[in-house]
Image (cartoon, helix red, strand yellow):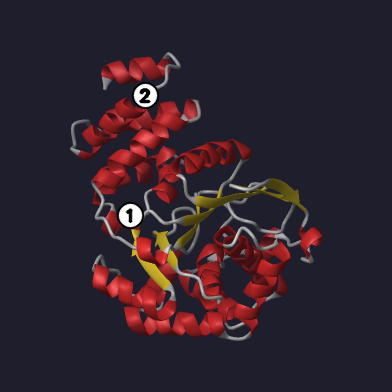
Amino acid sequence: MKEILKRLFAHEELSQNEARQLMKNIIQGKYNEIQIASLLTVFQMREVKINELTGFRQALLETSIPIDFSDYKPIDIVGTGGDGKNTFNISTCACFIVAGAGYTVAKHGNYGATSISGASNVMEQHGIKFTTNEMQLRRSIELCNMAYLHAPLFNPAMKQVSGIRKALQIRTFFNLLGPLINPCQPTYQLLGVTNLTQMRLYTNILQHLGIGFAVVNNLDGYDEISLTDEFKVMTNQYESIYRPSDLGFSLAHQEELSGGKSPQEATRIFDNVLQNRATKAQTECVLINASFAIQTRNPEKTIEECIAQARESLESGKAWLMFQKFVRINS
């Protein structure tokens, strides 16, 4: 580690294989907490590079519990997290709208780090029991188009750094790895990022992985499309900047997207959205994210067609029906 740190402080880059071996050493407990904290800190001084992040990802996937959903061609809808905005569970709501529209979703999620309620928090509030049982998860995806993969169960190696990350209380490159280590390695991904530097990084990585993707960023720093400002979308097919009004949506305000002050309040907002009883800002924010996820699955469709599909899933009650089925199957 001493030599690695010297090189990194001298602004050298690690090769993909060096990064892979470094992460394997961390997983195997070969470094102490001070060494790991120093490593995390140096990557705060400069952006992690593509080869480095790819190598870290490879090591974590090699030690994760694998699951094969390739025959379902699922999509994952996820943000990097840590944007500090304390929004409600936008991407998780979008998953069920996409499922209600007839597409398979394999959501990889965790407890909230900088918000009141992460995906796993809202799942637990509804009595969901997390599992790595492939038969159970396949049953879920077959009956309600949705499976939920609780990250700590599938990526036990992350426990090696969880205490250090909590102690540091800052975003690290592990935040960037989260969206890349879904153990089913989904065929498609809608990924929200907090800035344009991350957008370029992920776009290059996802192109290299050869999956269908859309990377989105609200230009005021949300790691999802929040409709609080202009937002940028980069896919395999195109890149574009939109104003909310370009697609028939209203400009939202930050306080309208709050996740509340408790997990219970965040859960009420989540349920209201899926029952089509939420505020206009909450509903539109989820619809626009679901719409770009649908387009990721169907790049031949215009975004207007995908918005119509997402809206029909919500307003017809299909999204809520899929969620109710999901709860019954997974409780």
* Position of the C terminus by quadrant: bottom left
**Residue type pointed to by label 1:** Pro
Q: What secondary structure is marked by label 2?
A: loop
Q: In the rendered image, is residue 174 in sight?
A: yes
- Left of 162 or right of it: where is 30? left
Q: What secondary structure is marked by label 1?
A: loop
Q: Nearer the viewer, residue 184 or 243?
A: 184
Query: In terms of image quadrants, where is residue 12?
Result: top left
Give percent across and percent down for residue 210.
46, 45
Q: Considering only vertical position in the picture, is 208 above or below 328?
A: above
Q: Nearer the viewer, residue 260 or 306?
A: 306
- Which residue is painted at 30% across and 69% down in the image? 130
**Residue type pointed to by label 2:** Ser
* Position of the N terminus by quadrant: top left
**What numbered label is drawn on residue 50?**
none
Q: Nearer the viewer, residue 195 or 31?
A: 195
Give percent across and percent down for residue 19.
33, 29
Q: Earlier in the sequence, mark 1 or mark 2?
A: 2
- Which residue position is annotated with label 1? 183
- Which residue position is annotated with label 2? 15
**Mark 1 and mark 2 residues within 8 Å of each other at the beta carbon:** no
Give percent across and percent down for residue 23.
28, 35
All told, the count of numbered labels is 2
Determine the CA span between mark 1 and mark 2.
23 Å
- Which residue is painted at 59% across and 35% down in the image? 197
- Which residue is painted at 43% across and 13% down in the image? 10
Give percent across and percent down for residue 166.
37, 46
- Left of 212 or right of it: where is 289? right
